[in-house]
Image (spheres, rainbow, N blue to C red):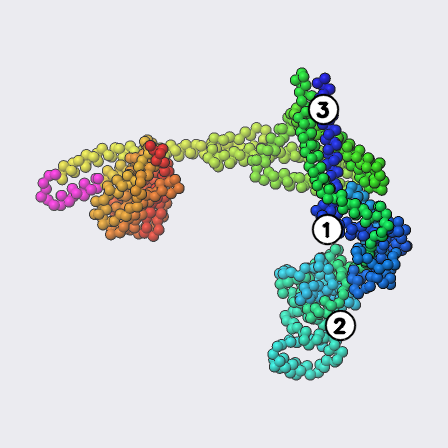
Amino acid sequence: MSKVYKRSSHLLYTIGICVFSMIMISSIVILNALDDCGLMYTSGTSLKKLLMDQAAYDYSIWALSDKDGNYNEEFMNEKGCNIGIIETDNGNLGDLDLNDSSTYIYRNFDQELPAQYYMTNVYTSDDSEFYLSEKLYDFLFVNGNEVYNYDIEEYQPKDIKGIGYDMVGQKAYVWDGEEFIELNDTSYNYKASDDGGTYNTTNIYDRIWASQVPEDSNQHSFTAAADDKNQTSQEDDSSKEKNETNVITEDEEDQMLPAESIITTSGDAKILYIDGKAYPALGDDNSGYILELYGTESSGALSLSNVADLSDLHDQLGSEDLSVCTLDTVSSVMEYTMDSSYKQYTVITFPRPDQSRDSFFVQAQRYLGIIPVLHVALPLLMVISGILVLVLSILLVIRAGNYDDHGRLSTDILADFPIEVTFVIFGCVESLAIAVIHYSAGYDYNTSQYGLVVIGIGLLIGIYAGILWAESIIINFKRKQLFRNTLCYKMLRAMARPLRRGIDSIKTVLASIKWGYRIAGMCLVIAFVEYMSIAVIDDKESLMLFWLLEKVVLAAIIIKVLKQYAKVKKAAVDMADGNMDVRVDTTKMLIDLEEHGQALNKIGSGLNTAVNERMKSERMKTELITNVSHDIKTPLTSVINYVDLLQKENFDNETARSYLEVLDRQAKRLKKLIEDLIEASKAASGSIKFNMESVNARVLLNQSVGEFEDRLQGSNITVVTQIPDRDVYVRADNRYLFRVLDNLMSNIVKYSQEGTRAYVELNEDGGMVRYTFKNISRDKLGISADELMERFVRGDMSRNTEGNGLGLSIARSLTESMGGKMELTVDGDLFKVDVTFPEVVKESVA
């Protein structure tokens, strides 16, 4: 019983979807038809006028379809329609008396026009095609009453004998040897350009203009129409003196432009002749503008030296009813004129009192009552049927592929077929249904009940086929085999392993080689060119298989070579990044690539050896400096102690006492140098163990400045501090951070210009804490900031100062070892140091 219920519910869902889909589709079709006719959003008086005008238009079509006969007089009498036909010019009735029978070329009534009548305009020709229907509207498939006018324009080819441009009206005209013809707007474009005219077009128009030059053209000239009459008269007098022998006759004067339209030519501008009359060129070859010509057969750019200036003929050209032409080639046009049989008719119609029940005016009255109902009913029907289709489709989707009583996923026959097979079946059925609908909708019998039944069956078949195909897709999706149940998947699975290896090789090549995609693209282009070359050969079948096999083998070889090259390149890149332990597997490599791989392996080994030796040498230097410093420190301590004892003795000899002071000062300086050497060695080797903690940067800086207060006063240096009032914390070793600040303050005391100000600041900047030390150097700084940071720079530059050149280097090493950054800037005599550490939030400190 359960199985019967499931099957019956499935059938009901399917039938419901089909029925409501047909209702929804029909509603949409009728709604679109109403909208196309302008009836969907029209009501009231406007709707009535639209319907009555359509009825009058339909009667006009019926009458004019038999204009060579009796204008379908029997049809008009049968339907009860009075009609009168007037042949007009552009629909202008002028002062015609519509009650005068002579106004009409045909009418089937004798009385005067009633108060309400309908007037329509219809264009026809001898080649017009009429579609007639006895229905005012058919909102499904049938064409209404229409007239289609074909080939109403006649084209005649003509050669161009001259071309000009009206700058006032912004229009181009061509001279065909007899008259001016307006050039279609799509055939040209007057635009700015520095390229000038095209070579071929220029040559063509040079020949065209040369052929128009009259024999006595040497007497044609242009003079300036100057506003200053005196200047004009002077120029005329001088020209008369020069041309006393050249007298212009009346005929020649007629060939020239009127005096008020004469334009001065300058430079290389030419004189152009149209119908024996001289015109100035619109410009020269360097005017910066061209007339671009767009022909159906050929196009080109025309420099303004080959375009006549027709601006003075603007009024004349605008007043004439000129023909219009389209450019065919750069030297010919196609002039088109209206078919001589093409005429316009004004048709006046009004109903008789005894009109038939199916006349167009009665149908219009009937639609006037139906359409307002359709305005509401059709959208509502469309929405309701659409919702029902959606609900039933969801229920069908939920039901499709449900588990049966034994826990197995139910299926159907189509779901077991591959997806491509079901798609082909679905496509064939849908194509058949569409063909049936199209065939039925394209012939007259579709207005009958049988035609609509055939169309309905076609829709039903198409919808049901779509449901079955969608259900098979849903079942495959629920079974998680949507892709696995395809022919492509089954074919790919059969060759998955070799294909996967090939894909991995291609991915490796494309990811490792910069030009991988370009190489692949070039290979594809070459293969395409070869394929097209083979395609034009008569006996191409014998070559095509060989070509395909050759491309497969060549692709395999290229991929293998590029894959080996990618290994070599990756090893080289890794070595460039500092990884000297990388090795290239050169087994089964090509000879050249194998040699490169082995060379890279040797380079890696050699560099590793060199780096190890260099590190060993650096360690030995560091150990030597440390050991020697320790060895010197012990006897130096004894020297300092004995010097101190000697200073406590009473010497009467002042010279000996001064010698002791020198010994004491230099011994202490040597002790400081040794301590700095040991400190620098430890900082460079990274052997210092830092006790990282949260340090109050503000307090530590105040302590450091306070330590040097006496020495700063002794050197007459004023320190200006900018330190925040609140505590600021950084993570560092308190002792070594103080050493950094101490070195920088010591640098200010030692090397600042006496009587100047030094600036010490502590700032917060975007989560960073920055110490800034600025002072004016006592000595000229003829050295860069980077050199000042090197060891022993101060000692190298001057042996007469207190420093040894290690203070800044030690400060930077300690700063960087604690995770900070130290930057030094030299601007003239301004010496600036910035020490930056990440800020520690106070809450985290607590």
Residue 26: image tag: none
Q: Amino acid at mark 2?
A: Gly
Q: Which residue is mark 2?
A: 276
> Alpha carbon of mark 1 to alpha carbon of mark 2: how far?
60 Å
Q: Which residue is mark 1?
A: 46
Q: Amino acid at mark 3?
A: Ser
Asked if residue 63 lies in the magenta stretch, the reply is no
Q: Earlier in the sequence, mark 1 or mark 3?
A: 3
- Residue visible at 70% across and 41% down in the picture: 376
Image quadrant in which the C terminus is located: top left
Q: Is residue 110 left or right of residue 498?
A: right
Residue 700 position in % (x across, y down): 28, 38
Secondary structure at badge 2 equals loop
Q: In this picture, which residue range is highlighted in magenta?
A: 648-668
Image quadrant in which the N terminus is located: top right
Residue nearer the viewer, 277 or 15: 15
Asked if residue 657 lies in the magenta stretch, the reply is yes
Q: Is residue 559 left or right of residue 546?
A: left
CB atoms of marks 2 and 3 within 8 Å = no
